[in-house]
Image (cartoon, rainbow, N blue to C red):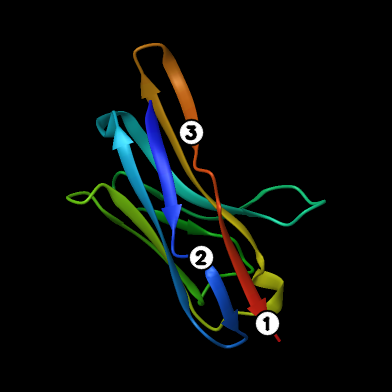
Amino acid sequence: QVQLVESGGGLVQAGGSLRVSCAISGSTYSIDVLGWYRQVPGKQRELVADITTRGVTNYADSVKGRFTISRDNAKNAIYLEMNSLKPQDTAIYYCNARGTGALGQYESWGQGTHVTVSS
């Protein structure tokens, strides 16, 4: 399995930009997909974007054209560049890894980082 630690959240004005990072440690070779999810209190956690080991990306419709997910294999990290932020982007952002280990498929989560977009 892997361990995930997010950083880079904070407060930003609407229209601004922010980048959140996720440091990955452990059995990184076992990872199949890395992604970013977000959750607002009282609502379900939702996928923001994910990226496969081959670099194929997938985005939620609500962030297409504004957010970019990327990975740096040398640094064992993924990033989410967020532009043209809106108040409705306010949430806790979680890093997620899904992979296949010796005991089968697994899923790991980070502790989350807060992103607040003021209007």
Residue shown at the point (51%, 77%) measured from the top left: 66
Q: CA distance from mark 2 to mark 3?
A: 20 Å
| Badge 2 amino acid | Gly
Residue 54, image x and y in percent?
A: 28, 47
Cα distance between the residues tagged 1 and 3: 30 Å
Q: Which of the numbered marks, if any, corresponds to residue 9?
A: 2
Quadrant of res 100: top left
Disc 2, SS = loop
- The amino acid marked with disc number 1 is Ser
In the rendered image, the residue lying farthest to the top is 103
Please give the name of the residue rendered at 71% of the width and 87% of the height, measured from the top-left corner: 119
Q: Amino acid at mark 3?
A: Ser
Left or right relative to 75: residue 77: right
Q: Are marks 1 and 2 in contact (CB under 8 Å)?
A: no
Label 3, residues with CA under 10 Å away: few <14, some 14-19, many ≥20: some
Marking on residue 19: none
Give coordinates of residue 61: x percent, y percent: 62, 66
Question: Is residue 117 toward the left or the right of residue 32 in the image?
Answer: right
For residue 110, above or below residue 69: above
Q: For the point 82% across and 51% down, which residue is it?
A: 42
Q: Give the mark nearer the N terminus: 1 vs 3.
A: 3
